[in-house]
Image (cartoon, coloured by chain):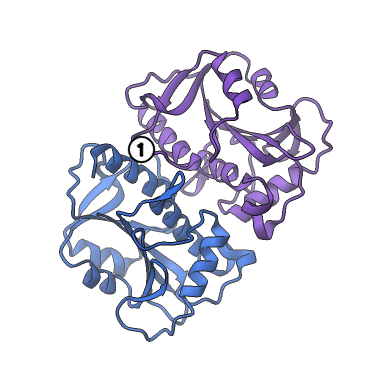
Chain colours: A purple, B blue
Amino acid sequence: MRRFVIVGTRALASPDFRLLDLPGTSGRLDVLLRCVRAGLLVSHGVRRDTTLYLVLLGGPCAPRTLRFDGEAARYLRPDDRSLAVLAQKALQTPCETDGFVRARPGVFIARGGLDAVLTDLGGFHPVVLDEGGEDLRAAPSLPDSVYFLGDHRGFDDATRARLDALAPASVSVGPVSLHAEDVVAVVANELDRRGL
Amino acid sequence: MRRFVIVGTRALASPDFRLLDLPGTSGRLDVLLRCVRAGLLVSHGVRRDTTLYLVLLGGPCAPRTLRFDGEAARYLRPDDRSLAVLAQKALQTPCETDGFVRARPGVFIARGGLDAVLTDLGGFHPVVLDEGGEDLRAAPSLPDSVYFLGDHRGFDDATRARLDALAPASVSVGPVSLHAEDVVAVVANELDRRGL
């Protein structure tokens, strides 16, 4: 079981963005959606063993969290627009819904941000992707590892404090600071190699 | 200097695609454009040392090739739509243009497919990304290596024969068959680690 949590500092928790200008109107939800592609989709298939949480901290309905489960996902397409349409439909779920409820096949939504995620995860081994961390290739990877990433702005202070309180492992994918989706791709590749 | 060549079996060599349905109307040019993002863009910056060639084998104007040079690129944005707008503008260059001509800042276009690329590359060390190849992490990487990838359909027969004639190294990124853009991300990460 592979799990990634991507925190969108300003990503809209409501469906009020324009598909014609996703980066400019969604608080960079596009960054998070490309992580879904990188984490869930492979050549001609879906990673059934992978779940991604997108923590949405922007807009009037925030915080909310989308969960994409590879096991139940259907009709997932790799392009930004298709993923944005899917997210927009899921975000039409009323804001006040508690717990993770199914919005589309394989797509769930909950009120709450990191706390909702932590409750949903139960027990796990937290790993934060961080430029100053231990090299991914040298770091242990446990079956219950959960990988936390920031968006293009990194983590906000509250999220960083909440994560620090979990005493996570800190891991770096390499010497260059990459887009979140490329970090997901590199971590997934490392796990593929380890047979995890 | 890093160089990638991605061959789009049916990717349109003309601007006659719809931004509202890029995957459905462009011969999956979207797959190639996401490789441009993975190859050229990092967190808050551009890889100035990287060039990507997109070989477009689809439509009435084919074959044509787009070249994206990190060194001269400006205003590159990571989302599908922005990259597609950029490509569409570049593809408005008349079909019969010989050699690589500048279409936009850092974006060049030439008539011809793989032959135009090989002429432009001059001397180089060819590496084909292939599921059955040697492990990327064990493979040598030379400063003049050029990495060739297929799109979601792999290579067409003519391209495969042309590449085989170059006696390339064959390299695999791991045990799972990945999207082309993730392959680019993993190769770039390996080169980052090697300081190449």
- Name the residue nearer the viewer: B82 or B8: B82
Left/right placement of residue A82 relative to residue A16 reads: left
Relative to residue B145, is residue A133 depicted above or below? Answer: above
**Spot occupied by residue A135 in the image (x, y as percentages of width and height):** 34, 26
Q: Is residue B54 visible?
A: yes
| Count of residue discs | 1
Which amino acid type is marked by label 1?
Pro
Image quadrant assignment for residue B161: bottom left
Relative to residue B190, is residue B55 depicted above or below? Answer: below
Q: Residues within 10 Å of mark 1 (few under 14, many from 20)?
A: some
- Name the residue nearer the viewer: A59 or B30: A59
For label 1, the residue is B175
Left/right placement of residue A110 relative to residue B139 reads: right
* Residue drawn at 62 percent across, 20 percent down: A121
Q: Quadrant of the C terminus of chain A?
A: top left
**Which chain is mark 1 on?**
B
- Name the residue nearer the viewer: A135 or B59: A135
Q: Secondary structure at mark 1?
A: loop
